[in-house]
Amino acid sequence: MTYDVAIIGAGVIGSALFRELGKYRLSTVLIEKENDVALGCSRANSAIVHAGYDPPTGTLMARFNVAGNKMYPKLCSELSVPFRANGSLIVALTEEELPQLRSLYENGTRNGVEGLEIIGSDEVHHLEPNLKESICGALVAPTGGIVGSYEFTTALAENGVVNGGKVLLNSEVVKIDKIAKDGAPLEDTKKEGYFRVTFANGNSIDARFVVNAAGVYSDVVQRLIGKERFSVTPRKGEYYILDKRQGTLVDRTIFMCPSKLGKGVLISPTVHGNLLVGPDAQDGEDKEDFSTTKKGLDFVRDMSKLLSDKVDFRDSIRNFAGLRSLPSGKDFIIEIDPDVAGFINLAGIKSPGLTSAPAIAVYAVELLANCGLDLVEDPDFNPCRDEIRFTALSDEEKAELAAKDPRYGRIVCRCEEVTEGEIVEAIRRPLGARTLDGVKRRCRPGSGRCQGGFCGPRVLEILSRELGVPRESIDKDKEGSYILIGNTKEPLE
């Protein structure tokens, strides 16, 4: 089969475009090298919907940040994704930083950010009494928000499937060729033709257009077909997740004034009721380095004390590290590749990439149309998906649901109060979970205080039952991350 569009990379950028193309009568395929979506940059980040005061005016980052921010409330409502417009405070730690607040205010105003306001120390502590007394002032950005980042990515991809798209997992792209309509190789990639995308497993697909949304690997993918145009460096950031007992320490997302390395260490509530603290910034070469370090985590703790000395890190329930795609230039790389007809790069999408994703997707469709893709709206496009979150229901609604389906009356994860019904639904949905962490990312068993110590074995049993496979074949996360190898008291070969 020849697809109209092949998207390489099932992070938030690729998944947002996948869903956006579902609005048209097209055949679209989303290609991912891992065994699930949202396993790269989209899995581990701050999950902040940025207001847009920071990116330099006139950049793609500024344009798509502000446009994407405005799209989030409706989009998350349609897709049943947790989102809250909690607002942001960018604080001045010293008197010397106060002029920087004014610069951010003016920059954000030029970018079209609404509601920005500079406040003094007294008002800062009225709004957020747990911040350090020494904080001198702040920029208020009321349009800032927080979101479930992997739920958002998964929902986008799932909605794309519901609207006719196809997802190919475990399909690492190792070769891209330009071919003529008769199947003959095209030496001149500037000529019109088709793409043959070949995977590490030997399979291949053909497509009229290819979009490179491969995150930290977008430079690698671009070089498979075109001349080297850019490089992408992974910037690692380490975080603390704290128990929900710490979740109300602040109401807004608290930022430091940004530096050349980024927005600095932040303190923020999460949409799930926890407290997030981080990240640091470490540039490297390893595109798979998700390790945490004592040095990095100590830095996060020390820097967070400049914002608040009331964070009790004894309530830390998990540390993690995420990667950001740092482009060789200073802006997002969103372009029709000048050397390859029909090939589009969505690369180097660093922060505010999560916020910008929906707006980038709309623009990428325009780029595809400029390349010759015919866009015919599909009147049957369904923008919505429903998902039950048991803890969000009233007592009456919970009782009614459990009476209809007893699985919703059985709590599997005590920390997050996740029911068997929710876990089964996460497995059975389009693009459903196939791993322990895949279930965790969709409906949160294992995300709480015990980190799956209680519910993990039960979730494993449910996966085995629902998928009809042995428990030993269930991975924890990425392919090969086995949990069980056999029964106890049996000799190992």
Image: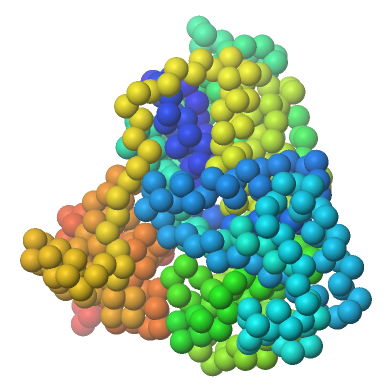
| Image position of 49 (left or right of 16) | right
The residue under the point 35% across, 42% down is 384
- Quarter of the image where one finds residue 168: top left
The residue under the point 68% across, 84% down is 125
Nearest the viewer among 262 and 206 is: 262
Nearest the viewer among 59 and 432 is: 59
Image spot of residue 399 (x, y percent)? 14, 70
Q: Residue furthest left?
A: 403
Q: How is the image coloured?
A: rainbow
Q: Quadrant of the C terminus?
A: bottom left
The answer to whether residue 237 is seen in the rendering is no
The mark tally for this picture is: 0
186 versus 80 height, above or below: above
| Image position of 376 (left or right of 280) | left
Nearest the viewer among 69 and 458 is: 69
The residue under the point 43% across, 29% down is 23
| Image position of 425 (left or right of 479) | left
The answer to whether residue 450 is seen in the rendering is yes
Nearest the viewer among 79 and 133 is: 133
Q: Residue furthest top?
A: 182
41 versus 270 height, above or below: above
Image spot of residue 378 (x, y percent)? 38, 23
The residue under the point 87% across, 73% down is 97
49 versus 222 height, above or below: below
Image spot of residue 267 (x, y percent)? 63, 76
Image spot of residue 76 (x, y percent)? 44, 51
